[in-house]
Amino acid sequence: MSDHEHVFCPRCDADFQCKVGSISLCQCTSVKLSIEEIQYLREHYEECLCTACMLEMKKEYNAKMLEKRFATISTLFKKK
């Protein structure tokens, strides 16, 4: 029985090997994610994503958080 599973990314349909049996060799360990970023990915996908999609989702999350911060800051400068 192989420790490596051939899977397809649920976001882009790219194929890759999930190495859950050798997690230190898995492609997902090359993407460093914060707890918040991991939660964001889990809100959208239950399955493993390919590296490219993980990086895109990380960027998407951080762009949304930056946009949210700008919106909050901009309210401080609005005239009353």
Image (cartoon, rainbow, N blue to C red):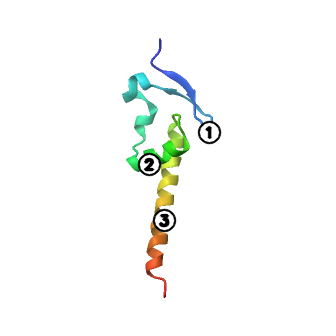
**Residue sitting at the far top:** 1
Q: Kindly identify the amino acid type of the residue bearing the numbered disc 2.
A: Glu
Residue 34 seen in the current view = no
Residue under label 3, please give it. Answer: 68
Mark 3–mark 2 distance (CA, rounded to whole Å) = 15 Å
Judged from the image, the secondary structure of the residue bearing numbered disc 1 is loop
Spatial distance from mark 1 to mark 3, Cα to Cα? 27 Å
Give the residue at mark 1.
Answer: 12
The image position of residue 64, as x and y in percent, is 51, 59
- Tags 3 and 2 touching, CB below 8 Å: no
Residue 43 seen in the current view: yes
Q: Residues within 10 Å of mark 2 (few under 14, many from 20)?
A: some
**Which of pointers 1 and 3 indicates the residue nearer the eye?**
3
- Residue located at (50% from left, 38% from top): 51
The answer to whether 40 is drawn above or below residue 20 in the figure is below
Q: Please state which amino acid type lies under the numbered disc 1.
A: Cys
Q: Which mark is residue 20?
A: none
Figure check: 27 above or below 33:
above
Q: Residues within 10 Å of mark 3 (few under 14, many from 20)?
A: few
- Three-letter amino acid code at the position of disc 3: Lys
Q: Which residue occupies the foreground of this view, 2 or 77?
A: 77
Q: Disc 1 vs disc 2: Cβ atoms closer than 8 Å?
A: no
Residue 15: which quarter of the image?
top right
Res. 37 mark: 2
What's the residue at 45%, 33% (across, down)? 27
